[in-house]
Image (tube, rainbow, N blue to C red):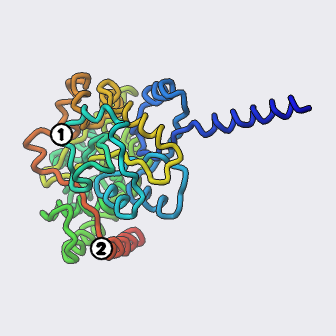
Amino acid sequence: MWKKLVMAASLAASSTAFAANELHLYNWNNYLSDATAKRFEASCKCKLVQDYYGDNEEMLAKLAAGAKGYDLVVPTGFAVQTLIGKGAAQPLDRAQISNFKNLNPGYLGGFFDPKNQYSIPYAVTTTVLGYNETALKKAGVADKVNSWALIFDPAVLAKIKGKVIVLDSQRELMAAALMYLGKSANSADPKDWAAARNVILKAKPYWAAFNNQSYIKELTVGNMWVALGYSNDLYQAEQDALKARRPFKIGFGLQKEGNTMSIDNFVVLKDAPRKDLAYKFINFMLEGKNGAELSNEMGTGSPNQAAMAYVKKDLAKTAAIFPDKASLGRLQQLKDLNTKQRRDLNRMWSEIKLK
């Protein structure tokens, strides 16, 4: 009987240990290929469990509501500021990140974490317009793809009514409207916000939906002709349409009035159950070939200079993914808002969504 009890206890202990040998990553959609995930699992002899979000505000709200069990998150710059300010980010142990040396110095020392004490750059994206080039030519508005007028000018929208889908993101949509008006994407002037809100409300009747999850598919299959989205998602839409041999061409690109650029970062959470696995994953993704696979498969830009030797040449020349010097001057990173500004924007966003 004693042997049976010892064996049962041993099995239970090993089962518990196995279950605990998991890295829980709270990540963006389309931000890690299956092949890369499997290679990491093989290297660490652990299981990678991912949950997904479509917007920084969604991620921050879930964590603020008390969500537990996540080891690693991938916030954009301004959301890194929020996590640090709330004491939710774990100061990093650089001794466990030997591949930190592979990062491009140009992506270090961001306004959100000047000494990179809490964050490690992972991927770079821009927020741009994706479009069905074939359909827009027929509609007579293909010349507007390089301007935010394509989603905000009622005269243009009248020709593509019901064929436009925009991100369900208050920060990104407001930023686009502000830039369309010639304002800074980071303006928090109440007059600028009111003007941006009015631009959005005038355009909204022509849009089909606010959507973070399925806008790629809607563009890929031809249900939507224009999508406000992230460059990596729109790259996926372009590639999926090509693979499916759709009878139309999908394109995406920057807008002349300016765009937002996001540096998404690894942040280890202070209450992470498996900080050791979080460090292993960060170091794994900072290897050159693994970082390049993220770009080649997912269409992200890369802050990893060791990855560039392995990135596809045509991808490296795509300005919306790897901006050239001329484009960089028109790109802005969103900054964090204070409590009052966040409250005011939430109120304005509710008004926009309900009208």
- Residue positioned most to the left: 326
Judged left or right of residue 77, residue 8 is: right
At x 32% / y 76%, what residue is drawn?
340
Q: Tell me residue 132's x, y (percent).
A: 29, 41
Within 10 angstroms of label 2, few (less than 14), some, or many (20 or more) residues? Answer: some
Point out the image quarter for the C terminus. bottom left
Q: Is residue 94 above or below residue 269?
A: above
Q: Looking at the picture, which amino acid does disc 2 mark?
A: Gln
Q: Residue at x 24, y 75 (%)?
A: 194
- Tag 1: amino acid: Pro
> Where on the picture, by quarter, is residue 257?
bottom left
Distance from Cα at disc 1 to Cα at disc 2: 32 Å
Q: Position of residue 295 (x, y in %)?
A: 30, 32
SS at mark 1 in the image:
helix
Q: Residues within 10 Å of mark 1 (few under 14, many from 20)?
A: few
Residue 76, x across and y down, in percent = 32, 51
196 shown above or below 53: below
Horizontally, is 144 left or right of 165 in the view? left
Residue named by callout 2: 341
Q: Is residue 241 visible?
A: no
Residue 105, numbered circle: 1
The secondary element bearing badge 2 is classed as: helix
